[in-house]
Image: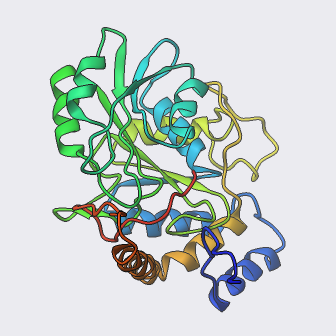
Amino acid sequence: MSDQIPLFKIPWDIEDIKNVADSVGRGGYWAKGPYIEEFEQRVAEYLGVKHAIAVNSGTSALMAALKGADIGDGDEVIVPSFTQQATANAVKMVGGEPVFADIERETYGLDPDSVVEQITEETTAIMPVHVYGSICQIEQLNAVAADHDLTVIEDAAEALGASKKGKMAGTFGDAAGLSFCQNKIVPTGEGGMVITDDDSIAETASIYCSHGRTTKDYFETSKSGQHVIVGGNFRMPDIVAALGCSQMEKIEQLIEGRRAAAQRMNEAFETSGGHHPAQFRWSTRLPVLHSNI
């Protein structure tokens, strides 16, 4: 009897341990330390974006991106009918209303025609999801958004590293949310990141994730600071960012490992008869098994 095949395995090495030990051994700045800034910089440089804001989960990243774009009470956000529940939950958590549109068969992403059918006077944004490491029909969705003056917030939790015509997933819209949950391309246990080129979105999202406080040196002063919006504590710990830094060092290796695993499974399916896994066009890797946000 064969062993059960796990949904995923976390790829780790000695560099991950060294980074965590360094963060812990510092004896301070466990909540806001130097690895946070380094991790944000590594992701921003990899994706070619202006801002990357580390948070504690992919769900928090979507919430912060929505808040950064001033999406909230009563605003309708079109989301795909095929996604993990966090996509719709993030909209509800900031006071918006998720509106479900159908998906298309090529990438399992939002169908642009279905999105158009769901647009009302209350619609303020579209939240496309790049599933299984594949980029959805984002260019067509951007065109729809432009025609109707809508914001585009990408859920790129499963697609870090995927690219289309030289442009990376998460960099097509106004902002995007990434996830570093333990089964994602770059795993840190839990964690997420808001990415954007928009200064206003970045500033508001950052404030929202730290109790609405404008001063950034949260743990370097005894003063209460100025709180300008209602926010929460969605900060990423320095220990988690330490793992993110070491994992980003080997991101291409991580992607190649997923491609090899997917290829092996696809070849096995070909001999089983009656099973034909989808082959996505715009991706740096072949499709992989389902992963959660």
Residue 29, quarter of the rendered image: bottom right
Q: Residue drawn at (21%, 37%), measured in percent from left and top?
A: 142
Measuring from the top left, give residue 214's x and y in whole percent: 60, 36
Instruction: Locate residue 127: give its quadrant.
Output: top left
Q: Give the side of residue 256 with respect to residue 242, left or right.
A: left
Q: Nearer the viewer, residue 200 or 127?
A: 127
- Where residue 207 appears, x then y in whole percent? 58, 37
- Name the residue at 71% across, 41% down: 233
Seen from this angle, which residue lies furthest bottom? 14
Colour setting: rainbow
Instruction: Establish if 13 lies above or below 108.
Output: below
How many numbered discs sit on the rendered protein?
0
Which residue is most to the top? 121
Whether residue 186 is situated above or below residue 111 in the rendered picture:
below
- Vertical relation: 39 (above or below) 221: below
Q: Position of residue 119 (x, y in %)?
A: 29, 17
Residue 187 pos. (x, y %): 59, 68
Between 71 and 207, which is closer to the camera in this rendering?
71
Question: Residue at 29% of width from left, 51% of height from top?
Answer: 107
Image side of residue 27 versus residue 229, left or right = right
Observer-nearest residue: 205 or 267?
267
- Side (left or right) of 12 relative to 155: right
Point out the image quarter for the N terminus. bottom right
The residue at the point 26 percent across, 35 percent down is 111
